[in-house]
Image (tube, rainbow, N blue to C red):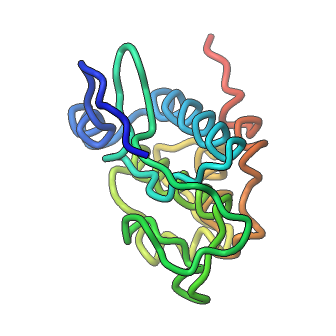
Amino acid sequence: MVMERPMPCTDLKSFVKLHGERLDEGSARKVMRQVIEAANVCIKHGVFHRDIKMENLLVSSEIDRLRCGAQMKKFAYKVFSGTEAYCPPEFTADGRYHAKPTTLWSLGILLFMMACGYYPTDYDLDLINKKSWIRRGLSQECCHVISACLQSDPQQRIDLEKMHLHDWFQFHYA
């Protein structure tokens, strides 16, 4: 699916760049709530986005949207269609991947980039899988939700439908 680009808007990568290469947790939380909601709507309607990344998310004062998608399949995908940096480890290891776990991996990469300002390194991913990754300047809850998405075992990733219930999203402003 390709949708018309609403105006005025910018892609999330440009938006983050304008805000100093990374977003504060409150802004990242607001973006992630909307992206998770959009990803859940897509999945419920049988659409697998396949390329969730900052360049494919539009930020507008009127509309925030995902720009592309594909019909979701019940069986494993054998050809990766998306951006290499967002490719889930199960595809590299087994040559196959499924829609929901891959969506979670992409959401984890997205949040990592918004909160940290760079793609996770192999070292970051190793620490995440050892459940010992922390990032100075980020809350424990933010680090945990990133880690819950970026588990190398797709079965260990957080549940997409329940992701919005994670403690990090329950933050209340005073």
Residue located farthest toward the top when viewing the structure as drawn: 174
Q: Nearer the viewer, residue 172 or 3?
A: 3
Question: Which image quadrant is residue 21 in?
Answer: top left
130 left or right of 8 in image: right
- Residue positioned 39% across, 39% down in the render: 57
Question: Which image quadrant is residue 19 in?
Answer: top left
Q: Position of residue 168 (x, y in %)?
A: 66, 37
Above or below: residue 10 compared with residue 21 = above
User: Quarter holding the C terminus?
Assistant: top right
Residue located farthest toward the bottom when viewing the structure as drawn: 94
Question: Which image quadrant is residue 77 in?
Answer: bottom right
Count of numbered badges drawn on the protein: 0
Above or below: residue 104 compared with residue 138 = below
Above or below: residue 75 compared with residue 10 = below
- Residue positioned 57% across, 61% down in the render: 105
Q: Position of residue 101 (x, y in %)?
A: 66, 63
Q: Nearer the viewer, residue 108 or 139?
A: 108
Above or below: residue 71 compared with residue 80 = above
- Residue positioned 54% across, 72% down in the render: 88
32 left or right of 52 in image: right
Q: Position of residue 90 (x, y in %)?
A: 61, 80
- Residue positioned 67% across, 75% down in the render: 76
Q: Position of residue 172 (x, y in %)?
A: 67, 19
